[in-house]
Amino acid sequence: MNRDWIATARTLSEALPYMQRYSGAVVVVKFGGNAMGDDEAMAEFARDIVLMRQVGIHPVVVHGGGPMINDLLNKLGIESNFVRGKRVTTRETVEVVEMVLSGLVNKRIVQAINDAGGRAVGISGKDDDLMVCEADDPELGFVGRPVEMNVQIIRDLYNAGLIPVIAPVATGMEDNETFNVNGDTAAGAIAGALKADRLLLLTDVAGVKNGSGEVVTQMSPDQVRAMIADGTIAGGMIPKTETALKAVEEGVRAVVILDGRVPNACLLELFTEHGAGSLIRSTEPRVKPRGLRQGGHGL
């Protein structure tokens, strides 16, 4: 008998406790990075999302689209200015952002999930006033910070067997302005409002690293704060970990920062003993330590 078939059957059998554990759970997945521009990686991600739904998980996909926004702005001859590493979003720029995120990127992900056998529906933070924002920083223009979340539309979709795919564009508190919202920030706010079981932040790095350059597999909020304070966590990892901390404070059971470039990263995290990336949670593991993960990510 083919050894690959045997290995596949064994893997499925070993995944059963994890599938049972997550049946009915809400898992918010922030999708972005290099995988979005690669057709094969997009198709693989879509299959993972469909499999999650097939075994009873309620996946909610929130996406970014920075590279695609840059491409269109360049084609239109619209210059991008940055303040402290963040794009200044003018009224002209935010129109392009909405076109790219709610149109091109959102529908591409929806189509990929549907092609994989799922039933995806694309929306943005503006639909049903899902995400209402105020200006995050006056210097940044139309960059929003969520202040009001109305997530019933998401519950209605996943309770109907659909997979919500959400573009991080939001409505303003005043005058119905349109705001661009950082994808990680939007995913964290949505996960917090849903009291999700997991928030998976897919990135282009292996996870949070310690001073020796090794990935830290499990962390408490206090450990994260200490690593930010002493400079171990720096650069682009700071906003990701701050998003994780806020999500945990708002009721998300755990947040995992993991490498979206790894094939089947979401499945490795949810359905295997060792998980993937760096898990941040405030509660102690509910089961005794297992394997290398000291409690594992899957349970």
Image: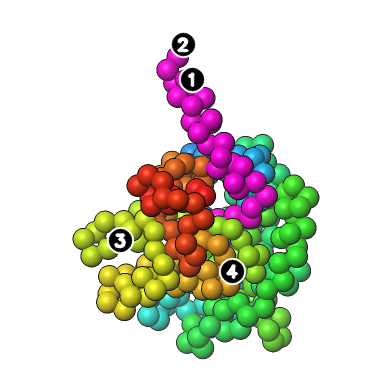
Whichever of callouts 4 and 3 sits on the residue coming sooner in the sequence is 3
Distance of mark 4 from mark 2, alpha carbons? 47 Å
Answer whether labels 2 and 1 touch (C-beta < 8 Å). Answer: yes
Q: Classify mark 1: residues with Cα within 10 Å, few (<14), some (14-19) or many (20+).
A: few
Q: Residue at x 47, y 79 (%)?
A: 88
Answer whether labels 1 and 3 touch (C-beta < 8 Å). Answer: no
Dominant secondary-structure state across the stretch colored magenta: helix
Q: Position of residue 98 (x, y in %)?
A: 61, 67
Q: Position of residue 286 (x, y in %)?
A: 51, 55
Whichever of callouts 4 and 2 sits on the residue coming sooner in the sequence is 2
Which residue type does callout 1 highlight?
Answer: Trp
Which residue type does callout 3 highlight?
Answer: Lys
Q: Which residues are magenta?
A: 1-29
Query: Residue under circle 3?
Result: 209
Query: Residue under circle 1?
Result: 5
Distance of mark 1 from mark 4, alpha carbons? 40 Å
Distance of mark 2 from mark 1, alpha carbons? 8 Å
Is 6 one of the magenta-colored residues?
yes
Q: Residue at x 65, y 69 (%)?
A: 193
Which residue type does callout 4 highlight?
Answer: Gly
Q: Position of residue 87 (x, y in %)?
A: 45, 75
Query: Residue under circle 2?
Result: 1
Q: Is residue 230 visible?
A: yes
Which residue type does callout 2 highlight?
Answer: Met
